[in-house]
Amino acid sequence: MKPILTAQEVAELLCCSVKTVENHARAGTIPGAKFGDGWVFVSELVIEAVKAISQQEAEARAQPQRKAKGFKVMENNQRKPPGMKHLSEEAIRQILTPQ
């Protein structure tokens, strides 16, 4: 692999568009330098950046994404907990209020 890559070569390497590569370069996600009208990239730094991004995304995927589902008894919307739709709002408050 060449030590210096163009945006086109990085795009081909990463299977994405040149615009995506340039956007990542502007954001600092992929280290690059602007020379004239185009971007250039050090191949080793691109590979390291992709490794770091891959590791971060893998760790994020390993974290539980699901949040506990809850419910609220709301005055205006009259939203009621599952299985309590037949009860009045006052009865639900009495059931859910700690004693």
Image: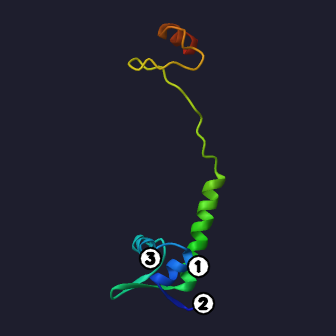
Of tags 2 and 3, the one toward the viewer is: 3
Residues under labels 1 and 3: Cα distance? 17 Å
Q: Quadrant of the C terminus?
A: top right
Q: Which residue is mark 3?
A: 18
Which disc, if any, is residue 1? 2
Of tags 1 and 2, the one toward the viewer is: 2
Q: Quadrant of the N terminus?
A: bottom right
Q: Secondary structure at mark 2?
A: loop
Residues under labels 2 and 3: Cα distance? 19 Å
Image quarter of residue 76: top left
Image quarter of residue 39: bottom left
Look at label 2 and name its amino acid: Met
Residues under labels 1 and 2: Cα distance? 11 Å
Look at label 1 and name its amino acid: Ile
- Please provide percent x and percent y for residue 18: 44, 76
Crowding at label 1, few (<14), some or many (≥20) Cα neighbours within 10 Å? some
Q: CB atoms at circles 1 and 2 under 8 Å apart?
A: no
Residue at (41%, 73%) from the top-left corner?
19
In terms of sequence position, does the residue under pointer 2 or pointer 3 come before the other? 2
In this rendering, the answer to whether 39 lies above or below 21 is: below
In this rendering, the answer to whether 4 lies above or below 20 is: below
Residue extending farthest right: 62
Of tags 1 and 3, the one toward the viewer is: 3
Q: Which residue is mark 1?
A: 47
In this rendering, the answer to whether 74 lies above or below 46 is: above
In terms of sequence position, does the residue under pointer 1 or pointer 2 come before the other? 2
